Image (cartoon, helix red, strand yellow):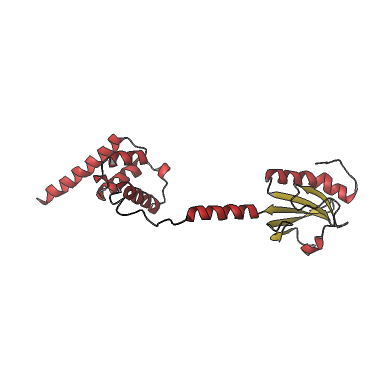
Amino acid sequence: MDHTRRAGKSGVLINRYAPMADGIAMLFFPYAEVVIHDTTRKKLVHIANNLSRRQVGDDSAIDDLDIDATSTLYGPYEKVNWDGRRVRSISIVLEDDQGRMIGVMCVNVNIAVFEEICTTLERFVRGVGVAQSHPVDLFKDDWQERINLFLHSWIQERQLGLNSLSRDHKRQLVEALYKEGAFKGKSAAEYVANLLAMGRATVYKHIRGMRNEMIAELDSFN
C-alpha cells in the first residue's frame, strides 16, 4: 500500500482515493477487490486485494462502462472473472477539486464463493433419502414433538419469540397446552418448564388452576 504523495491527476487519485480503496478491500477481505481507473490516461493506477490478476499500468477498458457525464454511480452489475467465477461490481466516479471526473473506483466482489456456500447449505438441508416425518411405529407416542409443534405454532401465530415471552404469555401457553392434553405424557410438565425457562412448581400451579376451573364449570352444570 504505497501512498507516497504524487502530483497530477493520477496523483490526486492516489493521494485522495487509494486509502479509501485499501480500507474497503481490508474490510471485506478476501472477497472484495477495489480498482482505481485514471479516466484521462485510461490506465489502472491502484489495485487493492488483487483478484483479477491485473496490474497497475494496464489499460483500464473503462469505455466498457459507457460513462455518462451526469452519472456518479454505475451498478451493481455482474462480470466474469479470469477464473470463470461471477463477480458483482459497482463503479463510482471520482472527481477533482473542480468537480471534474478524473477517475473511477470499481469495487468488485467475488459472489461465487457465497453461491457455493448456498449450494452446500441447500444440499445439507435437503438431505438424501430423508423422510418427511419420522416412522410412525417407532414414534407413535412422541408427546415431546406434539408439544414442540403446538408451542411454536402458538408463538408464531402471535408473532412472539420463545426467548422473549412474558410471564403472562407463558401462563397462557401452559393453559393452552393443558387444553390440548399435552400434560398426559410422563415428565411433560418438566419438559414444558425447561422449554419455557419456568420452574416446575409454576407449571404445576397453572395446571392446578386449569383443573380447578374445569371442576368449577362442571359443578355449575350440576
Tell me residue 175's x, y (percent): 28, 46
Residue 32 to residue 201: above or below: below
Tell me residue 86's x, y (percent): 68, 58
User: Which residue is painted at 25% across and 49% down in the image?
Assistant: 181
User: Which residue is painted at 32% across and 48% down in the image?
Assistant: 147
Tell me residue 169's x, y (percent): 35, 44
Q: In which quadrant of the rendered view does residue 93 lie? A: bottom right
Total numbered labels placed on residues in the image: 0
Residue 164 to residue 53: above or below: above
Whether residue 67 is visible to the viewer of this picture, yes or no, is: no
Whether residue 162 is visible to the viewer of this picture, yes or no, is: yes
Q: In which quadrant of the rendered view does residue 42 lie? A: bottom right
Which residue extends farthest left? Answer: 222
Closer to the camera, 68 or 142?
Answer: 142
User: Which residue is painted at 42% across and 42% down in the image?
Assistant: 163
- Asked if residue 208 lies left or right of residue 120, the reply is left
User: Which residue is painted at 87% across and 47% down in the image?
Assistant: 11
Residue 124 to residue 194: above or below: below
- Asked if residue 86 lies left or right of residue 118, the reply is right
Closer to the camera, 100 or 76?
Answer: 76
